[in-house]
Structures are given as C-alpha cells and as structure tokens.
Amino acid sequence: MKTAILSFDVEEFDMPFEYGGKPSMEEQIDTSGTGLKSLTTILDNYEATATFYCTGVYAKAQSESIKDLSRRHEIASHNYYHSSHKTEDLLASKQVLENITQKEVKGFRMPRMAPVSDADLLAAGYAYNASYNPTYLPGRYDYRHIPRTVFQQNDLIHVPASVSPKWRLPLFWIAFHNYPLSYFFYLCKKVAEADGYLHLYFHPWEFTDYINLLNGAKYPFYLHRNNGKRMRERFNQLMAFLQREGFTFRTTSWLIEQPYLFPERTLKNA
C-alpha cells in the first residue's frame, strides 16, 4: 500500500518582507486564512487527512479555525513566530496549540527548514521533527548528507521531505510550481516505489493571489508561477493523480508509528 503524507505550513505570511513588501499582520493572517479555506475544501473533496504545522501567532489569531481543523487533521507546531526563534518558543507554541485543540502536539517543523536542536525539541516534548528537505537549495541549506527517509537520532524521529531516490531532486512546494506536472507525478511514483510513502509540503498562501494583493514586493520568477487559481487547479490534479495511483492519505504521526520503520525499537519495547 502506498501512503501520501501531505503537510502544510500555516503561518503569518511574512515572505513579502524578503522582497520589499510591508504587509500588516492582519494582511499576513488573512492571506494564509484565505488559502487555508481553499485547500481544505480540496482535501475534503478527496476525504484526505493531512498534517498542518501552525505557528503560535497564527493559531492565536485564528483559534476557532485551528480547533475546527484539528477535528479531522493533525496539528503540529511551526514555531511560535515565523521570522524569529528562541528556545522557549518551542514549548510556548506547543502549549498554545494544545490549549486550542485539546490534543497532544507531537510534531515540529522549523520555518524555512532552519536547523533546530534535537535536545531542545525533546525537552519541549516533541516526538518528531519534520525540518529537513534532504537536498541542496542554493542560498538556504545543503541537507544532502541527511537520510532521505524517516530516521531516528538522539531519541528523536526525523521525517524528511521527499526527494527523488537517485539525484535527490526536491518535490517541495517550489518544485511543484515549476516542474511540469507530468514530471512531478513521475517523481512521486519513483519515490513511492523506493520508500513506500510520499511526503510533500506546501503553504496555504500558495492557493491565493497574494502576488497581486500585497503591493511593494518584487518576487523572483519561480515564485510567480502557478499561484492562486492555477495552484488550486494543479493541486486538484495532484490529488486526482494520487487517488488514481492508489495512495492512502495519512498524517505524519500515523507514519512514525509504523513498526516497519523502526524494527529495532519495536523489538526493544516488546
């Protein structure tokens, strides 16, 4: 059986600041909120579950939305703030999300896939970290030394984003916007054949016309492509493809609980 782990980083939309824009906090929250409604409608159409990594700032601003989301999907942490980090933010964001959802928050993803300490995450009570995209992204990170698939390190489980088996071609959100869909689908099939599961991640704001709405920001060409309506259409096609290929939609927490991933740990605990 093939498994698709779809995940979304739900945050105050601060990316315009990197490119000369100056959106208000209200605009940042509203942009992500608008996209969240669009993408969850598509997920509902396919009866798909997913994992949503939420910042504490966004969750506090949209607590009812996050509580409603938690009834069907997994809620995990995306730090307290999207643009800054202190060690104490790890626990603070977890507590905010658990207070809103009344459910345990097991997972964490650092904004922009930045490094984060295993020890700090364990001390804050997290079971897994999804902060690795095990490829080379110029100007951001080089994680080509990181295992491609789920692994355990320092008692913390890591769930890297999917990359192709041979050349570690990324399948993250920028790739989805810029690869031809047929090639993206081909890579999805290759990953599933090699790993037994597929782990993709996106953002709600990709489903909006944010480039036209937030004046002042000048985005590079690869961020201009296939946003808003085109993203909604492409994502619908992705969901239809995954359904045709026989993928089952699961959460990240479901994935890390599968015994075949950690047979030595299962034997130890038996």
Image: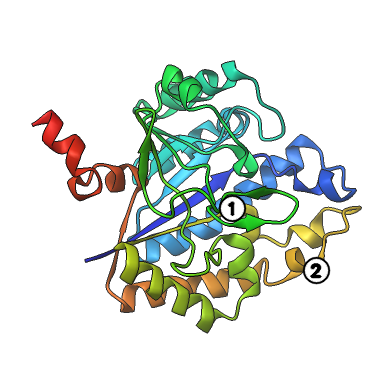
Position above or below: 109 against 268: below
| Quadrant of the image occupied by residue 107 | top left
Q: How many residues crowd mark 1 within 10 Å: few (<14), some (14–19), many (20+)?
A: some
Q: What amino acid type should be assigned to the residue bearing mark 2?
A: Phe
- On screen, residue 66 above or below 16: above
- Residue 84 in sight: yes
Residue 267 in the figure: left or right of residue 16: left
Of residues 250 and 214, the one drawn nearer to the viewer in this rendering: 250
Q: Position of residue 40 (x, y in %)?
A: 47, 56
Q: Is residue 237 visible?
A: no
Residue 155 location (% of width, % of height): 34, 28
Say what secondary structure mark 1 lies in.
Answer: loop
How far is disc 2 from disc 1 in space, using C-alphas?
Answer: 18 Å
Question: In terms of sequence position, does the residue under pointer 2 or pointer 1 come before the other?
Answer: 1
Q: Quadrant of the N terminus?
A: bottom left
Look at 59% across and 81% down and name the residue there.
180
Is residue 126 positioned above or below 163 on the image? above
Which residue is depicted at the point 68% across and 45% down? Answer: 30
Q: Is residue 240 above or below residue 260?
A: below
Label 2, secondary structure: give it. helix
In the foreground, 38 or 104: 104
**Mark 2 highlights which residue?**
221
Q: Position of residue 4 (x, y in %)?
A: 35, 61
Report whether 228 appears left or right of 103. Answer: right
Residue at the image position 63 percent from the left and 57 percent from the top: 136
Q: Which residue is at the front of the view, 77 or 147?
A: 147
Horizontally, is 110 left or right of 4 in the view? right
Position of residue 11 measured from the top left corner of the image (x, y, whole percent): 62, 40
Residue type marked 1: His
Tag in front: 2 or 1: 2
Kindly identify which residue carries mark 1.
203
Q: Quadrant of the C terminus?
A: top left
